[in-house]
Image (cartoon, rainbow, N blue to C red):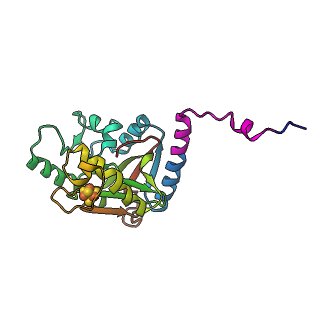
Amino acid sequence: MPEEKSFWETIMPIDRTYNRDTEAWYFEQRCKKAIECLEKNYMKGYYAPDRKSAFATVMELIPPGSVIGYGDSVTLHQIGVIAELRTSKYNFIDPWEPGVSSEESMERRRKALTADVFLSGANAVTLDGKLIYIDGIGNRVAGLLFGPKKVIIAAGANKIVSDAENGIKRVKEIAAPLNAKRHTFRNPCGVTGFCNNCRGELKMCRQIVIIDGEHPGIYPETHTHVVMVGESLGF
Ligand code: SF4
């Protein structure tokens, strides 16, 4: 009869150091669950284990010769897509090209709404198949909702939450303060790190949008493609 182990002998073999494989496993499970639910909502999901494969997946989804618009996204920068699109090989409408005037930037944001392809990140992805966004002036959410023939989104596993309520909470507690800080906005969340439901000129969450799926009749070929990345990316 095998010798019975004590409780302490049973738990001793556990590796108590930080383990990247454990995190990767956890992220993969959550990404795959989110993809399953996004697809029930007529969006197409792709799993990319890391930023390198996310870059390849996003670039493969862009049809050759497309006019490409985008809504500002830290994730798209982190996976290398924006640097690639800024090379001369693409017809890329870039409102944030260094040196562009604010008038020209606004004009490019308008043009992006009729591009062939629109790229973006996400503020939250829910485990019941929804995408959650905040916007300050609406150009990003507008491009995601209607206009461009194809929408491609890249989101890190850190963006996954259980439902829309927790998605909006994530926006106010994490995405807005970090994005405010990134833009050096002197609004309450950018100064203190906490939301106080401000109403001033620098309020950056004027539009809160929940995308609860696509219309399969209007878009027989999938309109929204979501690349879920098994890494922590963006805010
Ligand atoms: S309401 Fe104001 S303080 Fe709160 S997250 Fe939005 S911009 Fe920040």
Q: Nearer the viewer, residue 82 or 23?
A: 23
Instruction: Please state if 192 lies on the left or on the right of 170 as rendered.
Output: left
Instruction: Please give the name of the residue rendered at 42% of the width and 42% of the height, measured from the top-left corner.
Output: 232
Q: Residue furthest right?
A: 1
Instruction: Please give the name of the residue rendered at 27% of the width and 59% of the height, measured from the top-left corner.
Output: 196
The N terminus lies in quadrant: top right
Q: Is residue 1 above or below residue 115?
A: above
Instruction: Please state if 60 lies on the left or on the right of 99 as rendered.
Output: right
Ligand 1: image quarter: bottom left
Asked whether residue 110 is in view, the answer is yes
Q: For residue 3: magenta?
A: no
Asked whether residue 147 is in view, the answer is no
Q: Position of residue 92 (x, y in %)?
A: 22, 42
State the extent of the magenta-drawn residues as a range: 5-27
Q: Nearer the viewer, residue 113 or 157?
A: 157
Q: Position of residue 235 (x, y in %)?
A: 34, 46
Instruction: Please give the name of the residue rendered at 30% of the width and 62% of the height, measured from the top-left corner.
Output: 208
Instruction: Please give the name of the residue rendered at 49% of the width and 49% of the height, measured from the top-left corner.
Output: 31
Q: Nearer the viewer, residue 23 or 105?
A: 23
* Total tally of numbered discs in the picture: 0
Tell me the quarter of the picture where residue 221 sits. Answer: bottom left
Q: Position of residue 13 (x, y in %)?
A: 68, 33
Q: Position of residue 116 (x, y in %)?
A: 27, 51
Q: For residue 8: magenta?
A: yes
